[in-house]
Image (cartoon, rainbow, N blue to C red):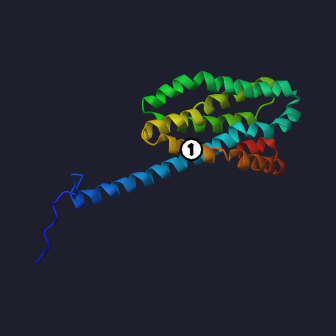
Amino acid sequence: MWAKPCNTAIAGTGLTPRQSAHNEGMHAATSAYKRNFVFWLSFAQLISWGSVFYGFSVFLEPTEQALGLGRAESSLGFSLALLAEGLLAYPVGRWIDRGHERAVMTLGSLWCAMAMVALSQVQNLWQFWGAWLLLGMGASATLYPPAFAVLTRRFPNDFRRAIISLTFLGGLASTVFIPLMAALIEWLDWRDALVV
């Protein structure tokens, strides 16, 4: 004869064995999705930090030589980027809190790519500063602050672990991108390296 399904609840859970197995499967699927999501967001952080933040130190000398800039003038470009990032932090955070995190971070990444192309075409100091302002605007939607907000919203009960994972991979940006960009500048030149 056929065995009847067990409808007796597991002690202390109020769930039948079938319901318990289903919940465990759902939990495993959710955890796998979470790890996958955190990995790809962390990978995006690696690229964003490497190209925007750490790229400045590698491109500094060739840019100064090509444009005839002093160290104070070129460093002001980076300061302008930080200013733009700080000024846009509040509206970016509001858009993320309203559930637009995917659009914010996608548009921020596209904006950074456009700003890198603009930086590759600069011919004078004012254009250089303008390109760095554009980079700062893009960075406000792509670096750690918006990513942390996304993780906190998505995983309110487990955001600490997600943030630790993200900062670990993001922390490798200088290790990966400084030698990579230096090699690209040597192989191409600084303008073409920015476009790559």
Q: Position of residue 132 (x, y in %)?
A: 71, 29
Q: Is residue 43 placed above or below 61 in the rendered structure?
A: below
Please identify the quadrant where the N terminus is shown: bottom left
Find residue 86 and report its image quarter: top right
Residue 160 rendering spot, x and y as whole percentages = 51, 41
Residue found at the far front of this picture: 11
| Marker count (numbered) | 1
Determine the residue positioned at 23% across, 61% down: 17
Q: Along the line of sight, which residue is nearer the eye, 122 or 46?
A: 46
Q: Residue at x 54, y 45 (%)?
A: 41
Q: Residue at x 67, y 34 (%)?
A: 115
Q: Which residue is mark 1?
A: 164
Whether residue 46 is visible here, answered yes or no, is yes
Q: Is residue 124 visible?
A: no
Query: Residue at point 83% right, 24% down?
Result: 73
Relative to residue 118, is residue 14 drawn left or right?
left
Q: Amino acid at mark 1?
A: Ile
Q: Position of residue 23 (x, y in %)?
A: 30, 54
Residue 76 occupies quadrant:
top right
- Viewer-side residue, 124 vs 185: 185
The answer to whether residue 79 is left or right of residue 40 is: right
Quadrant assignment, res 59: top right
Q: Residue furthest bottom?
A: 1
Q: Position of residue 156 (x, y in %)?
A: 43, 38
Q: Secondary structure at mark 1?
A: helix
